[in-house]
DNA sequence: TCAATAGTTCCGATTTCCCGAACTTCAGGA
DNA sequence: TCCTGAAGTTCGGGAAATCGGAACTATTGA
């Protein structure tokens, strides 16, 4: 296993953030991690909504989120603990992540209602 | 030529917006159109930065922006006039577009400086 | 009617994405 | 120490998206 890559905050690219969050599974995972008050395991997301996500796809999704600089992952025994990097990103791109998460929540509300 | 598709504002998807703006050429085009005080022709972007964009690719880029709901395109004689749909999107996803455009400008500044 | 201009469409080559199968790593047991 | 199971990663091949040159369409002006 190669070591996990985490870009330093000044290497984080807007392009990579938008690409990472332009996938419905990834934005759902990230919203959960960002909203949680403790680290989340990868396996917590073996299904998102009513959709089952294969392990290999899940692993790729976490890699994309990680390498975009959105989350920090740390191996803890047999599992992985994932936390968001919101505070750092807030410094670099103020208001970006809150706006995206708000939009995501707004959309989820209207699709439940409609 | 098939008619141009513009989603109604309630059909605009966050996913589509983020995907459209996750491309460096498209976000540059959109930032220009959003910042302009008059409609912009497609051919105004036949090069972005120092990079030349082939006509067919440019056409695809405009299609992606249009179908994501980010711009409205209207044929005016032989050319196309493109305007942003920021006001409508602001109603649906408050603060989203300004945050992305701010981040885009912040990034451009640091890459010139660095 | 002809030529020029602005965009679009087609299509083949390249790239990226998806996911099953095999693999690695680690933590308990026995 | 050697199993066994659990949690993720990597590999590889088929599916899907992207890129761009060439041909096409639509409109204007001479």
Image (cartoon, coloured by chain):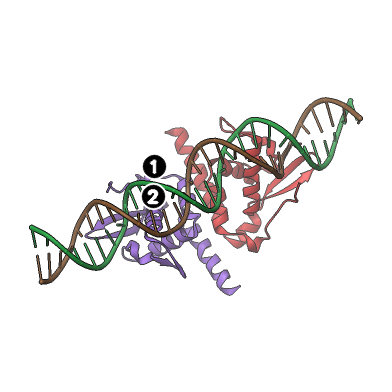
Chain colours: A purple, B red, C brown, D green
B76 or D11: nearer the eye?
A: D11
Q: Label 2 belongs to which residue?
A: A69
- Are the residues under badges 1 and 2 in a single subunit? yes
Please state the horizontal and vertical placement of residue C3, each as a whole percent of the image: 83, 25
Q: Label 1 belongs to which residue?
A: A11
Point out the tag, 1 or 2, that comes first from the N-terminus.
Answer: 1
Mark 1, Cα crowd under 10 Å, few <14 / some 14-19 / many 20+, is few
Query: Can residue B95 be spotted in the picture?
Result: no
Label 2 secondary element: loop
Image check: D8 left or right of A21? left
Q: Is residue A60 above or below residue B38?
A: below
Image check: A113 left or right of B3? left
The chain letter for the residue carrying disc 2 is A
Image check: A30 left or right of B70? left
Q: Quadrant of the C terminus of chain A?
A: bottom right
Query: Can residue B104 be spotted in the picture?
Result: yes
State yes or no: discs 1 and 2 in contact (Cβ < 8 Å): yes
B57 or C22: nearer the eye?
A: C22
The quadrant holding residue B54 is top right
C18 or A93: nearer the eye?
A: C18
Mark 2, Cα crowd under 10 Å, few <14 / some 14-19 / many 20+, is many
Please state the horizontal and vertical placement of residue B4, each as a whole percent of the image: 73, 51
Q: CA distance from mark 1 to mark 2?
A: 8 Å
Residue at position x 51%, y 44% from top?
Answer: B104
Please state the horizontal and vertical placement of residue A50, each as a whole percent of the image: 47, 70
């Amino acid at each position: 296993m190669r070591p996990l890559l985490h870009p330093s905050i000044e290497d984080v690219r807007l392009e990579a953030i938008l690409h990472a969050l332009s996938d419905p599974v990834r934005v759902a995972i990230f919203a959960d991690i960002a909203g949680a008050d403790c680290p989340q395991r990868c396996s917590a997301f073996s299904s998102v909504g009513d959709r089952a996500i294969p392990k290999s796809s899940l692993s790729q999704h976490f890699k994309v989120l990680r390498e975009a600089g959105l989350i920090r992952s740390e191996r803890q025994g047999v599992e992985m603990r994932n936390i968001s990097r919101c505070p750092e990103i807030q410094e670099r791109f103020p208001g970006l992540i809150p706006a995206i998460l708000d939009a995501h929540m707004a959309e989820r509300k209207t699709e439940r209602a409609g």
